[in-house]
Structure formats: C-alpha cells, structure tokens
Amino acid sequence: MNIKQPYHRKGTIESRKGSQQTRMSELRSLANDKTGFRALEQQLKALKNENIKLRDELERSSRLARIDKLTQIGNRLSFGEHIKHIIDDLNEHKNNGKHPVVVLCDLDRFKGLNDGFGHDTGDAGLQAFSARMKKAMRRQERRAKTALKNADEHRSSVDRRKTNDLVIDDTLFAPSSEGYRLGGDEFVAILWIDADSEEEASKKMKLVDERLKKATSAMCFTHNNKSFPLVTSMGAHLIEKGDTAESAVKKADVALYQHKLDKGDRYEHTFNTLKHKGTTNLQYVKDHRGISLDDIPKYNFTPPNVTLDTEPS
C-alpha cells in the first residue's frame, strides 16, 4: 500500500494537468472563434448590467425602508441607526467640536384634530409640520455653513470667543441636522452645536431650546380651505458621553412633558395670535387629551439591532 501510494498521487496530478490543458485548449479555441467570443462578451455584459440593476434596486429598497411614507422624512429605523452611530462616535471622541442634541416633538391636540376634523386633516397637519422641519433644517444648514465660512475667513483677526459669538448670532446649529417621524404625531430632530467644550455647548443648548420654542409658537396649516393652529410641545437633551440611545431619548422625553404642562395656555396664545393676524377661516381644535406629572407616559425607544454603514455627516 505504501509503495503504490506515490504512483496513485502521481496519476491524480497527471489527470488534473490533463484536465487543465484540455480546458485551456477549449478557451483558446473559444477566443479564436470570433463568434463564440462575441457571444461570451455579450453574456458577460448582460450579467454586469443585471448586477448593476439588482444593486440599484437593493439600495432603493434600503432607502425606502428608512423613509416615512406619509411625510417623506426619516422614520424610526433611520433615527435609530443615526443616533447609535452618533453616540458611538461621541464615546470614541470623534465629535470634532460638534455636540449633538436630540429634540423630541409632538403636535398638541392632534387627537382632537383627527376626531373633530377627520384623519385626512390630521395627515395634512403631520405633512405640514414635517415640511416645516425639513425647511428649517435646510435653512439652518445653509446658515451654519455661511457662519463657519465667515469664521474661517476672519479667524486671523478675531479670537475664538468672538468666532463662537458669530456662530451664535447667525445660527446655533452646525451643518447636517436631520429630522425624523417616529410614528403618530411624534417627531424627533438631531441638531449639532458648535462648541469647544461641553460647558459651552450646554450654554448654547439653552439658546437652542428658547429659539426652537419661539420658532414654533405661532404656526398654522391649511386644509380644505380651513386654517388650523399647529402647536408643538418639545423637549431637548444635549447628548453627553456615557449616554445611550435609550437614555438620551428618555431625558428629552422628560423635558418634553414638562413643556406640555402649559400646552393649553400656549394653544390659546397661538390661536389668538393667528386670529389677530387675520388668518382665514381659522378653526379651534378641542383638547381631547390632558397631561399631568402623575401620568407621564414612559417613552420606550429601542434602537434597531443593525450593522451601521459609514454615512456622511
């Protein structure tokens, strides 16, 4: 057995060489045959096009899975991926002077809007708010880029403190702020604050909170020739090292429901302001849901367990 084994291996090797030579001969014949070569070339081209088509379809499906169909902004899945990615970078010291803020929002008297005027009106309210959110994000990004450009141009003649003041005066936000719909009348935004330290970011955070609430204090939308106040409660939290996606959202949620305590007064103020401005066919929406500190709903956010791809900031 031991004597015959080498011959057996030798035979196997020779057999493989013969098979390879035969295959090479077939390939040479195919290459020399112009008709066969063109056919092979066409098949490879068709396979390449099919592969591109499948890849594009996969990318399209992936994008659609992360977009809210009604409002056309990011959905809960998209937000979960983004905030997890942000917190991972923050904990690895990759924030580069930009501090993320998570802002929770929901529409006051949304249940009354649905019950009193129909779900189509409620949907119109959601679309109107998301459109305002997208517009605000784009405007803030343009202002942020302009402020940063101006700061760079004047960096040689002004100190860092004045540069930060310039950013505060122009905009509180760095580029790449984004908004999402979590479901129902609940929205969330991720904003970025330019600051050299957490202490400075915390101070700017208070201005962020004030400006956001002021900017949403007298909004309305129109549907079927009727105008409706669009009043929003919101809560913001400056994401810190050690935060998780769940803890960051819960802290913003506590701030949101603190803001909700005076939602009745804020609604009346908005309604009267719009009425004083002469808003056409203004409708009053009844409050079908109250709020108290003893009955604060617990916001349960669980980020999806996904593998994150590198995304542009």
Image: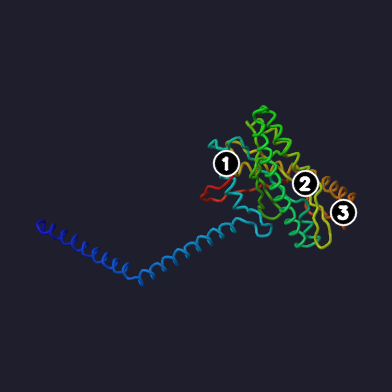
Residue at far left of view: 3
Q: Which of disc 1 and disc 3 is earlier in sequence? A: 1
CB atoms at circles 2 and 1 under 8 Å apart? Answer: no
- Mark 3 vs mark 1, foreground winner is 3
Q: How far apart are labels 3 and 1 at the CA level?
A: 43 Å
Read off the residue under disc 3.
Answer: 279
Question: Dot 1 corresponds to which residue?
Answer: 87
| Within-10-Å neighbours for mark 2: few <14, some 14–19, many 20+ | some
Q: Identity of the amino acid at label 2?
A: Thr
Q: Can you give x and y, in whole percent of width and height, for residue 129 in the image?
A: 74, 53
Please name the amino acid that badge 3 sits on.
Thr
**Which quarter of the picture shows residue 39?**
bottom left
Task: Give above or below for 155 relative to 228.
Answer: above
**In the rendered structure, which disc, 2 or 3, sits on the residue that comes first in sequence?**
2
Check the picture and name the quadrant holding the C terminus: top right
Task: Please tell me which residue is depicted at 67% across the width and 46% down the height of the picture.
Answer: 189
Element at badge 1? Answer: helix
Task: Please tell me whether mark 3 sits on a helix, a strand or a loop.
Answer: loop
Question: In the image, residue 160 lies at what x, y percent?
Answer: 66, 28
Q: Residue furthest bottom?
A: 35
| Quadrant of the drawing holding the N terminus | bottom left
**Label 3: how many Cα within 10 Å (few below 14, some 14–19, many 20+):** some
Residue identifier under label 2: 216
Callout 1 amino acid: Ile
